[in-house]
Each structure stands twice: as structure tokens, then as C-alpha cells.
Amino acid sequence: MSAENQQDPETQQEPQAQQEPQSPEEIRADIEETRAELGDTVEALSEKADVKKQAQQKADEVKAQAQAKATELGEQAKQNQTPLTAGAGAVLALLLLILILRRRKS
């Protein structure tokens, strides 16, 4: 057992011989509580063991982050169109220059 799973000796229950006798109702309640805890533990272990589900969750998370970033960049481009227009103009001018130079060589 790891140190994380070990309980402090003061918080551990006393052995059955030193405890007061329990009524059948108390025993049943303890059993039901233990079953519920066991069910929660099994469910948590199942979640950790489901690699396909974890991969899907991570993919969904990354996809959502990418969509948020794309939206943010789109908004920035709409707000600041001057550099985008200037860049497009520069590319167009460069293409025209290349076409003119190729025609002169021919």
C-alpha cells in the first residue's frame, strides 16, 4: 500500500473486539455504505481505464481551443484590415512583376 492510501493510525477504526456491538440495522447500513463506496471506486477506475474516451475528450478539447483561436484571429483580421490589404497588394504587385519579367525574356 502506498503512503497516500494508508490512513493515520488515530483515524483508523478500532478492531471489532474493542468496538461496541452493532445492531443488525447498523451492520446493514455499513454494508450499503461500503457498496456505494465500492461502486464509486469501480466507476472511477473504469473512467481512468477508458483510453478511447480519454483520447476523444482530449481531441474535443483541442478542437474547441483551435476553434476559439480561429474565431479570435478572424475578429482581429476584421478589426485591422489595413495590413491584410497591404499584404495582398504587395503579393499582387510581386506577381505582376514576375509576369512582366517573364514576358520580356520571351
Image (tube, rainbow, N blue to C red):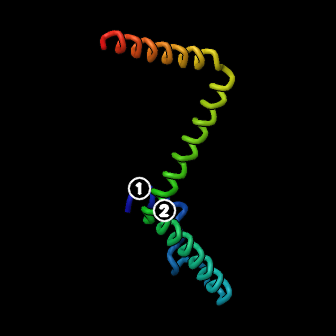
Residue 94 appears in which quarter of the rendering?
Answer: top left
| Residue 53 rendering spot, x and y as whole percentages | 48, 62
In this image, 82 relative to 3: left or right?
A: right
Q: Residues within 10 Å of mark 2 (few under 14, many from 20)?
A: few
The earlier-in-sequence mark between 1 and 2 is 1
x and y, in percent, of residue 95 in the image: 44, 17
At 48% across and 69% down in the image, what residue appears?
Answer: 46
Q: Amino acid at mark 1?
A: Ala
Vertically, is 86 above or below 8?
Answer: above
Disc on res. 16: none
Q: Quadrant of the N terminus?
A: bottom left
Q: Position of residue 63 (x, y in %)?
A: 53, 47
Determine whether, in the image, residue 39 is placed left or right of residue 80.
left
Q: Which residue is mark 1?
A: 3
Query: To which quarter of the image does residue 32 belong?
Result: bottom right
Say which quadrant the C terminus sits in.
top left
Q: Is residue 63 above or below residue 24?
A: above
Which element is circle 2 on? Answer: helix
Q: Nearer the viewer, mark 1 or mark 2?
A: 2
Residue contact at pointers 1 and 2, CB within 8 angstroms: no
Residue drawn 49% across and 13% down? 93
Residue 16, horizontal then vertical, whole percent: 52, 80
Secondary structure state at the residue bearing disc 1? loop
Three-letter amino acid code of the residue under disc 2: Lys
Which residue occupies the extreme left position in the image? 105
Q: Nearer the viewer, residue 55 or 85?
A: 85
x 53%, y 60%: residue? 10
Between 93 and 84, the one nearer to me in the picture: 93
In whole angstroms, how far apart are the C-alphas of marks 1 and 2?
A: 30 Å
Viewer-nearest residue: 100 or 45: 100
Return the residue at label 2.
Answer: 53
